[in-house]
Amino acid sequence: MEQDLMQKIVSLCKRRGFIFQSSEIYGGLASTWDYGPLGAELKKNLKEAWWSSNVYDRGDIEGLDASILMHPATWKASGHVAGFTDTLVDCRKCKKRYKAENTDGKKCPECGGELTEARQFNLMLKTHLGSVENESNLIYMRPETAQGIFVNFQNVATAMRRKIPFGIAQIGKAFRNEITTGNFTFRSREFEQMEIEYFVKPGTEDEWYKKWIDERFNWYIKFGIKKENLRKREHAKDEVAHYAKACTDIEYQFPFGWSELEGIANRTDFDLKQHMELSSKDMQYFDDEAKERYVPYVIEPSGGIDRSILAFLVDSYREEQVRGEKRVSLSIHSSLAPIKAAVLPLLKKKPEITKLAKEITADLRGSIKVVYDDTASIGRLYRRQDEIGTPFCITVDVDTLTDKKVTVRDRDTMRQERIEITNLKEYLSRKLT
């Protein structure tokens, strides 16, 4: 039943223009995805909601957009060159590659062929800068966005005259040559992160760690995820990364089971000290009030945009029977919904109605994402908008020509209200907040 839900989500995403397989006309490229017109809007809205919550609504966080390509020494300092690896085996017969932990060490789990000896495989994607490919110009596609923040710590603190505690937020792409991918967009080789590095005075990190766990957990609930589908899972001691003192995952109950949506880690002062040692640049902060210098500790809330989009889609998916027909809808939060309103003429063959409907659509454009549709019966038009999560449908009918009112239908309740055209913008603005 749960896997059936996942198949429905994948089908809806392609059919309605949320997510397509990348390079599909050539057979696709495994675990890479293209966001279609509605998916691009949903992704943009999610980023804006996250950015507003963490950068605009707080007074202690600055934004950053660091380069994807960084000096290779960055990844030596962070430990990725030496330690960002999986232990892998290859099948001599079918040539498939597996994580050693997922096999019995002797036989290929798919074809039964003989497996090679286990070896270490770095997960970073490599490329070269310049016209000649050799080891001297080898660089990496960043496997995480965090290091771009750490190397800019002093730049941001100085330029923005920031005092600790403060944070730096970033949204951006990262790349990992994952061997085990799958579950649609949950795990892929090219993905997007929304991440904060929050710098605190040593000794206060435990308090801030707990605050950020609650802050991020409640953010998902605020934007519509059902609380019963979320949980906090603290990492066991043998599970915590080498750079962290503690880590807690916010997990979502996907159709394929509980899986990480976002991690909140206490990264201590590991990263700044590593960069300070390798670059010989001072990463210490001078506390004017205490008259002391120290390397800040860091609390890191790090979430995946692609995983979040998948969670919001799954959580908002609804099926019900209405007048003997199946109704599918996405009850997604109005601030995330790709299209905010659809203007629908009741009678396509009556030019006065279609003309007025198009005028209303034009008037609403610029303030919200709105569409005009007259390509089907009104019932089918409603169902089409329900399935893509449009919060409101605005119907222009014969009475509109005389009373200057339209019928506004709510996606979730299916209730209808007659609203004066002159009050429509204010009505939608109030309802969509």
Image: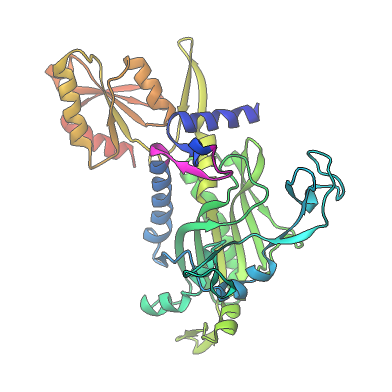
Farthest residue to the top: give it. 324
Q: Locate residue 28: give its quadrant.
A: top right
User: Observer-nearest residue: 54 or 370?
Assistant: 370
Q: Position of residue 160 (x, y in %)?
A: 36, 75
Measuring 53% from the left and 73% from the top, which residue is drawn there?
A: 137
At 52% from the left edge and 88% from the top edge, which residue is drawn?
292
Q: Nearer the viewer, residue 216 or 87?
A: 87
Say above or below: 30 vs 75.
above
- 290 vs 206, left or right, is left
User: Relative to 408, is 226 above or below?
Assistant: below
- Above or below: residue 389 compared with residue 282: above
Coordinates of residue 319 in the picture (x, y in percent): 52, 23
Left or right? Give the position of 223 relative to 122.
Answer: left
Q: Is residue 38 magenta?
A: yes
- In the rendered image, the quadrant that contains the C terminus is top left
Q: Of 215 and 318, which appears nearest the observer?
A: 318
Location of residue 263 (image quadrant): bottom right
Position above or below: 82 against 348 = below
The colour scheme is rainbow
Residue 428: in magenta span: no
- Residue at 19 percent across and 34 percent down: it is 362
The span picked out in magenta is 27-39
Provide residue 390's location: percent of width, then percent of height: 37, 31
- Residue furthest to the bottom in view is 291
Q: Is residue 414 visible?
A: no
Q: Locate the N terminus and report the quarter of the image it occupies.
A: top right
